Image (cartoon, grey):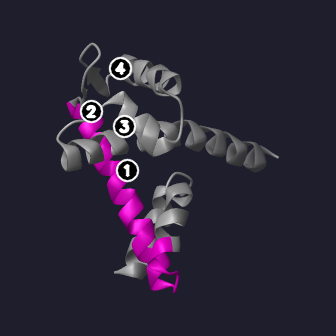
C-alpha cells in the first residue's frame, strides 16, 4: 500500500516539475535560436494563451528561475539555466535510448517529452548505459 502511494506521489510531483522544465527549456531554446524569449513566442510554441504563460512565468519568477523585463524579454537566472540544462540532458538521454531500441527519430523526440519527466535517476542512468 505504501509503495503504491509513493508511486502516485512521485507521479504528481513529476507532473508539477514537467511544466517548469518545459518552460525553462523553451526559454533557453528561444534565446539560443532567436536571441530572446518573449511570452507571446512561448504561448505560440506551446499552443496556450498568453494569460496561461503569464501565470506560469509569475510562478517561475517566484521560484527564482526566470527574470522578466516589464512587457519584454524573459531571462533565465543561473538556477533557471541549470534547470534548463538538466531538462535538456534528460531529454537527450531518453531520445538516444528510444532510438537505440528502434523508435524512429520523430517519434522518439515526441515520446521523450513525456517520459523524461517521469523516470527516476536510476532508470535514466540505465537508459544512458544502454544507449551509449
Choose top left, top right, bottom left or bottom right for residue 89: bottom left
Read off the residue under disc 3.
Answer: 41
Q: Is residue 126 visible?
A: no
Q: Earlier in the sequence, mark 2 or mark 3?
A: 3
The mark closer to the camera, 2 or 4, is: 4
Q: Earlier in the sequence, mark 1 or mark 2?
A: 2
Q: Residue at x 33, y 50 (%)?
A: 86
Measure the C-alpha gap from mark 4 to mark 3.
Answer: 18 Å
Could you say where residue 122 lies in the image, as x and y percent from the top left? 48, 62
Element type where label 2 sits in the image? helix
Read off the residue under disc 1.
Answer: 87
Could you say where residue 120 lies in the image, as x and y percent from the top left? 52, 56
Measure the C-alpha gap from mark 2 to mark 3.
Answer: 22 Å
Q: Residue at x 55, y 59 (%)?
A: 115
Q: Residue at x 39, y 67 (%)?
A: 93
Q: What stretch is highlighted in magenta?
A: 78-106
Decide: few, some or many residues near mark 2? Use Cα within 10 Å; few <14, some 14-19, many ≥20. Answer: some
Q: Which of marks 4 and 3 is nearer the N terminus?
A: 3
Could you say where residue 118 lies in the image, as x and y percent from the top left? 57, 53
Measure the C-alpha gap from mark 3 to mark 1.
Answer: 20 Å
In this view, the residue in front, 118 or 75, is: 75
Read off the residue under disc 2.
Answer: 79
Amino acid at each position: 500500500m505504501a509503495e503504491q502511494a509513493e508511486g502516485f506521489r512521485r507521479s504528481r510531483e513529476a507532473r508539477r516539475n514537467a511544466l517548469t522544465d518545459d518552460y525553462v527549456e523553451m526559454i533557453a531554446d528561444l534565446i539560443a535560436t532567436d536571441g530572446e524569449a518573449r511570452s507571446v513566442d512561448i504561448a505560440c510554441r506551446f499552443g496556450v494563451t498568453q494569460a496561461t504563460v503569464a501565470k506560469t512565468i509569475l510562478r517561475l519568477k517566484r521560484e527564482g528561475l526566470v527574470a522578466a523585463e516589464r512587457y519584454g524579454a524573459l531571462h533565465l537566472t543561473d538556477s533557471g539555466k541549470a534547470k534548463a540544462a538538466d531538462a535538456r540532458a534528460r531529454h537527450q538521454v531518453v531520445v538516444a535510448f528510444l532510438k537505440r531500441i528502434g523508435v524512429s527519430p520523430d517519434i522518439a523526440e515526441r515520446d521523450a517529452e513525456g517520459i523524461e519527466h517521469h523516470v527516476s535517476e536510476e532508470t535514466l542512468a540505465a537508459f544512458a548505459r544502454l544507449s551509449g
